[in-house]
Amino acid sequence: MNLHTLNTPAALIDVGRMQRNIARMQTHLDALGVRFRPHVKTTKCRHVVDAQIAAGAQGITVSTLKEAEQFFAHGIRDIVYAVGMVPAKLGQALALRRQGCDLKIVADSLPAAQAIAAFGREHGERFDVWIEVDVDGHRSGIPPEADLLIDVGRALTGGGTLLGGVLAHAGSSYEHDTPDALAAIAEQERSRTVRAAERLRAAGLPCPVVSIGSTPTALAAERLDGVTEVRAGVYVMFDLVMHNIGVCEQSDIALSVLTTVIGHQEEKGWAIVDAGWMAMSRDRGTQRQARDFGYGQICTEAGEVLDDYLMSAANQEHGIVSRTGTPDTDIARRFPIGTRLRILPNHACATGAQHPDYHAIGDDGAAQTWPRFYGW
Amino acid sequence: MNLHTLNTPAALIDVGRMQRNIARMQTHLDALGVRFRPHVKTTKCRHVVDAQIAAGAQGITVSTLKEAEQFFAHGIRDIVYAVGMVPAKLGQALALRRQGCDLKIVADSLPAAQAIAAFGREHGERFDVWIEVDVDGHRSGIPPEADLLIDVGRALTGGGTLLGGVLAHAGSSYEHDTPDALAAIAEQERSRTVRAAERLRAAGLPCPVVSIGSTPTALAAERLDGVTEVRAGVYVMFDLVMHNIGVCEQSDIALSVLTTVIGHQEEKGWAIVDAGWMAMSRDRGTQRQARDFGYGQICTEAGEVLDDYLMSAANQEHGIVSRTGTPDTDIARRFPIGTRLRILPNHACATGAQHPDYHAIGDDGAAQTWPRFYGW
């Protein structure tokens, strides 16, 4: 099987690019003296995660307990479930720990912390719990200066739990697109999370782990004093959103969707392709950025970017390829029926999730099937 | 297993609502004297399709050859693959036909028609090909008055193929939201497709099938003279986009996502839930409609609509629930951690695709697992 014989639509991974992306992040974080814990929600693929670990990653981050179960079954013990724990999921977490998984869970409220502690005491377990810190008002977490931080810390040191550390994610880093702004939000993520750890320690509570990260802040960080580990996910593939933020080039994007031209509307300058939103996802993450790539950037089958050609609209299994600016009324001759194109995605996590398998393409064009899973 | 014990997030089908939706469409089309061929891309679930056929549907429409293969293996022979055929997929189509599948394929260009005919002659097969007609400039198809229509018809009657009919889809019906406008676009879809059939017949070509449809036009059609069959997909579940178009009530929507509250940001009036865009999809189909539902309408676990509460934002595995208008700073007491909610989706096809299984909920709250498939 190779690039030219794959059925379309198909999700491709350019293995050379992926390996360069992995090496770039690992080298950067090694130089800053912190551990790296990749977020596997981007690919949910053991072949990719094996490559991340081979390059030096220590443990993984997951967004669902199914990811924890799958990767623990694959042999990875050190796992952080980075979504707030609720009572109904504690049985599943307990089962993983009893099988030997070193699962860490997260809380950012007193009711959640108390429920975890009570469940732990009831079942003779000591859950390793990290407190989520809010560094930018983006979503979840406790502000580092809040009294609640200490209250939650105390609730996690009264039996049934260990207070393992603090964890933050500067999700608002996606809203910036200059080196200075990214360096500033990276420093904000670092300093506020470290401040939370210092306050816990000053209150006599343990806080061995200080975990932060997002792809933009991880790459923009210039110093990581007080941080013990960094988490990031999408860097392994990159995508057009990351390109617009300014942390990668289009030529770094390792994920693309292979598609075939199935028709035209010549007067409109449209080529119709067999990749619609089912293959690309509905993610329009570049819509509010400085450069809107529609549903994706068109490339040749070999991967050469075709400037000005975008997937401008999508139905479930149909995509519309058109030129920005004046319509290309010669499009039926440029891309005849049967032409194969690659499309760079807005958001690698969303596009990957639409596909049961990746097709890993080597430098010689040979394709290997790398399965990924989905669901909860 | 029942509604109250399911893990979250989970895709629920309210079976009573689904059966009423199926009966409504079938009764309407029976009264108009046409066959009904549901589009199974909405659910890709044999339990749902079995219910559609039990109610009177004749054959199915598919958006991928994988759907054709899966449903043929399940015993359905009469299948239309309603996406333009390309040469590279003819081998797959041939294999299905040789196994006994009565697969119909679609073409809207001379190169595609010629390639199908040549492949058919080469393999001693007569592919049943329908010509796609453009009734509204929405996407694909040949305008009914174009000379190309006759040229393609002739290319399909020279061996290797049978000209089985014409097929159209008024995708632009989604842009309307009044009964008059919907009736008008339904009549436009009907009359232009019938006109294409008449022109083929006048040129001495066969055109036994006249196939049209979309959920809005199928439900709005007042007469279907000259039409032999109608296709529609999303009607079986309905969704908030269809609600805004005006063809269903919120109380008709059979698909929802069950979720659990995992945290709060009280000052902002946010409840954080464990359904993000991975569970809802990134589809924001109501964004440009008269009423924007964000990522979905919040309901109680039992399904009662909570007016003014929407999923206002989503990350991969986190959703933000908030009140429209003034923030609900009492939200942590209204929806404490562990509260289970249901979310009505923007687009049932997109939301369903994120889930490996539906959980079919009966009137007594009992849950059955109905698997669905994905990929190509």
Image (cartoon, coloured by chain):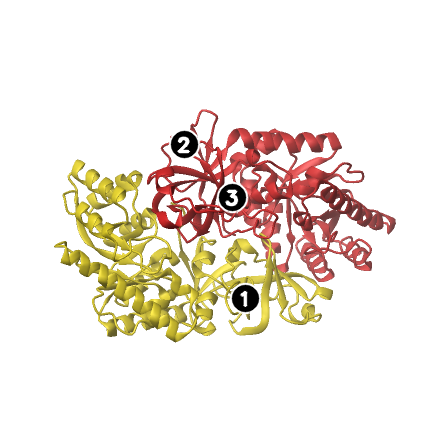
Chain colours: A red, B yellow
Q: Secondary structure at mark 1?
A: loop
Q: Which residue is mark 1?
A: B293
Q: Residue at x 52, y 34 (%)?
A: A47
> Which residue is labeled 3 in the image?
A345
| Residue A178 visible in image | yes
> Are dots 3 and 1 in contact, CB under 8 Å?
no
Are dots 3 and 1 on a single chain?
Answer: no
Please state, as top left, top right, bottom left or bottom right, where the N terminus of chain A lies in the image: top left
Q: Residue furthest left?
A: B204
Name which quarter of the figure residue B37 lies in: bottom left
Q: How many marks?
A: 3
Label 3 secondary element: loop
User: Which residue extends farthest top?
Assistant: A364
Q: CA distance from mark 3 to mark 1?
A: 25 Å
* A31 sits left or right of B231 in the view: right
Position of residue B47 measured from the top left corner of the image (x, y, whole percent): 35, 60
For this rendering, which residue is in front, A205 or B336? Answer: B336
Q: Which chain is disc 1 placed on? A: B
Q: In the image, what residue type sits under mark 2? A: Leu
Tell which of B318 and B293 is nearer to you. Answer: B293
Q: Amino acid at mark 3?
A: Pro
Residue A297: x and y in percent read 50, 42
Query: Which residue, given by chain and number where applicable, does mark 2 sit on?
Result: A3
- Same chain for labels 2 and 1? Say yes or no: no
Residue A186 image position (x, y, % from top left): 74, 43
Look at the numbered disc 2 and give the secondary structure of its residue.
Answer: loop
Q: Chain of mark 3?
A: A
Evaluate whether label 2 is on the same chain as label 3: yes
Residue A363 position, x and y percent, is 48, 25
Q: Is residue A53 visible?
A: no
